[in-house]
Amino acid sequence: MSGASITLQALHDGERRLEHDLLVVARRHRADHEVHHVATDVARWSHEHAHRIARAAQHYGLDLSGPDGDPGPGLMAAVREKAAEALGRRSEIGLLLLYDLCDLHLTATENSLRWEMLAQLAQATDDSRLLDLATACHPQTLRQMRWTNTMIKTLSPQLLGSV
Amino acid sequence: MEPEVDRIAQPWGGRTPYARGEPWPARVDSFLAPGVGTESVEHWAQSASLLHSNGDAMDIAVADGRIVGVRGRSGDRVNRGRLGPKDLFGWQANHSADRLTTPLMRRDGRLVACDWDTAMARVVAEAQHLLRERGPGSIGFYTTGQLFLEEYYTLTVIARAGIGTNHLDGNTRLCTATAGEALKETFGSDGQPGSYTDVDHADVIALFGHNMAETQPVLWMRVLDRLEGADPPQLVCVDPRPTPVARRAAVHLAPRSGTNVALLNALLHEVIRTGRIDRDFVADRTVGFDELAAQVARCTPGWAAGICDVPAADIERAAEILGGAERLLSTVLQGVYQSHQATAAACQVNNLQLIRGMLGRPGCGVLQMNGQPTAQNTRECGADGDLPGFRNWENDRHVADLAKVWNVEPSRIPHYGPPTPAMQIFRYAEQGSIRMLWISGTNPAVSLPELHRIRDVLGQERLFTVVQDLYATETAQLADVVLPAATWGEKTGAFTNADRTVHLSEKAVDPPGEARPDLDILLDFARRMGFRDKDGGPLIGWHDAPSAFEAWKECSRGRPCDYTGLTHDRLRGGSGIQWPCTEDAPDGTERLYTDGITWAGADDCETYGKDLVTGASVSGAEYRALNPDGKAVLRAAEYLPPHEDTGEEYPLQLNTGRTLYHFHTRTKTGRAPQLDAAAPEVWAELSAGEAQRHGVAEGDLVEVATPRGSVRGRLRITGIRDGMVFLPFHYGYWDTPEGHRPGRTGGRAANETTISDWDPVSKQPLLKAAAARLTLVERADGAVSPAPTTTASAPVDPHAAPPTTGGPAAVAAQTAAPPEGDGR
């Protein structure tokens, strides 16, 4: 596999994972209405990114058009889902929200680094298709990172202070 | 013009036409209680209107220690003597027999009367206990858009530097938060660019989601008088309902809810495509044009037509009028602010003005409007959580400057994060991290979305709730302590309207019983809490409204909203005065940005900006790089599909809103007989086509339901767009047997049904963004829908309901010349 296809494959996985995780967090924290609605909005970006990556990948001999399988919740996610239900109105639900936002931020950051690598490779190899792809998608990944960071900064004084 | 007119039947009164560029002629409106003649009025106290944001100047008539009527002030720049129906009749609510006259405290589950000392001691004990045990983050304040400037400023100092909490907001979050945020995003700082006098000069007036005829009826009289005069303006109206504005518009666009960004992007696309841009203005005064042009490049009228369900040809025609305007005035209100993508859409209106170079000249302005009379002061004084004087909480120099004004250490003012907006304050209370909520002058148990949830939050045992109000509102009935407040006409203070005009409102009569001015209540709390500055002196050094005003002036010094040229005495007599008013501009300032953009530099601005989709903050360094010369920022935004869309189960878009005759949750207007009778009960509106599809007819009792709750009301068939149902939001339960919640006959408050969703940028709740279904409960069988016939609720069949009239009780005087002895 070429460097381009390795990176495209990893980005495709990363964007699909972020979309999935955003939608899980949106569902889990539906009583935190801003998180619920904005997570759903920005999940759409990752969904579109994955489609664009799959289209581009065909030109590098890579077939990413498989079914949108559910990556499935990790063990921690399953535990949190149960905990969120049990906690209801208790203040510990706030801690769960902060942990979930941290995970989203880290996943978005990983994607961002891969977009960076792809853009660098595209410039070095004068590959305008890859450069256009990264130029179109990477800014939205950065916005996903800024959003999770802003939410963590805004919510943590109250949510940690009241545990 | 007739000397007397039924102002319920004819809300806008008689016409005084004037030509473009001429001054608006005076017309003095007055209404006195039956049997009271002018000769029996002992005293006229100066004031301005408190039941909308227009700031209509008026004098309050007093006889025998009671308010007996009102008269417009002919010399005032805002209204030239005119009054709206709520101005004329609303004052009667002051005398309502059910005013609160003593404090109340909950004992064994019931609210019982007590004295002030007992009530305040309880509030102070709770606050001190929470500060000790849980810290300042356990206390929140939720105020209003109806107190006076001096009261907001005092509340802000108490909350931020006294308690030290970030949890301070006003119900202005529901009415004006997006206006403020859109101005910050575009111009770096809050501050209304335009002036009402722009109506006198404009050749095109575009109203975006702004039913001016009902929300600011006196400003609409100004437009009507222009329409009747020589060289009238053309109106462009964006509104899904057949408002009085829409009926007078050259083009009326009635889009699907939630599609304002798509529509505005298409209008911008057309203006750019046809080259109707002021390139010099764009180069000199703005940044971001290339990004904006790229964002709207594919937003053709055809594309928007598919999203908005508006004919592409109408979009083109509207763009043609906007693009061809010589002097364009745009105004914006709740149709934008309470809809999906609120701030993003409001910013596109700013963009339209900027790319056309329509700013800072007579007739060329934007009015991002307010809903409430003193909402502007909530914003300026920081009672919406922002730092006072439009200071930037992320700029350490601004915080240090404020700390100097207050003589406290900067660390005493919480500035590690943004202020907590109202909906998040209620979320923290729901989670249990906020344990005390002090609610002043507002009624969240009717006005916030998803009311069953709000009632649950307020009803929690672990939440200590203080409610400061005039009446036993739905919210007060859920409180632990109720403090009886004085209102307009019973206390002195200043307030500022939507075009920056500051008015003085004088005390005319004593408040009933033991009710006290809000300022006195707050000062008493501060004294009992013993708040100190860093030298051990009292944190709050003022003791009445004039001294509070002087303290605020110091806080405003050198800021965009500079009040240092004003005093209470200066505001007495004559006209209201627009800020900034300083030594250099002693008569105030008619328009902002006449010589360029002044507060958008990174060192001066109130915010570094936010992502218009996510609300994420932009850093100071990024802002400086984006806008090194402090110009206006053309903020581009992509259209996003709405969060709650229609489907099989909920096929209608739900739109909630106001009517001309009521204000907010009807606490005052429901107690003024003429206003109450004009719109006595909740109703629902559908188009004729939609009614046919649903098998319902005019006057039928219907239920409007969403996943969150339902409302029952009688149906009115109007010219509203297909696919939409409208509910007025004013009605609650205080005048029903249940008192604060729905009874057996179902919900009456529109917010039983609305969704908890807010704009991530301005944090304004989106009260026009839900999907609903409508079902028949029972046939009309002769019953008539209570919807007014004079407004956007007018029936398509003029014979469907008797016309709304007020009869002899609603006859008010109107005279073209100022009356004898007017004193000006």
Image (tube, coloured by chain):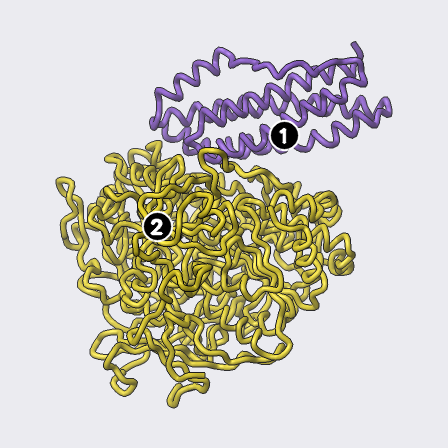
Chain colours: A purple, B yellow
Chain letter of the residue beneath label 1 in the structure image = A
Residue A49: x %, y % from top left = 67, 26
Are the numbered discs 2 and 1 placed on the same chain, yes or no? no
Q: Give the mark count.
A: 2
Label 2 to label 1, Cα distance in Å? 45 Å
- Quarter of the image where the C terminus of chain B is located: bottom left
Residue that protrudes farthest toward the bottom in the picture: B820
Query: Which residue, as the protein is rendered here, is positioned at the far top?
Result: A1
* Residue at the spot 45% in from the left edge and 87% down from the top edge: B817
Identify the residue at image location x=35%, y=50%.
B700
Q: Position of residue B218 (x, y in %)?
A: 46, 70
- The N terminus of chain B is located in which quarter? bottom left
- Residue at 53% x, 53% y is B240
Mark 2 or 1: the one toward you: 2
Q: Residue at x 75, y 58 (%)?
A: B277
- The amino acid on which the numbered mark 2 sits, given as a three-letter code, is Asp
Q: Front-most of B82 and B152?
A: B82
- Residue A62, quarter of the rendered image: top right
Disc 2: which residue: B700
User: Which secondary structure, mark 1?
Assistant: helix
From what the image shows, is residue B499 above or below residue B610? below
Residue at mark 1: A45
**Can residue B221 be seen in this snapshot?**
yes
Question: Quick check: B749 left or right of B76?
Answer: left
Residues B86 and B410: in front is B86
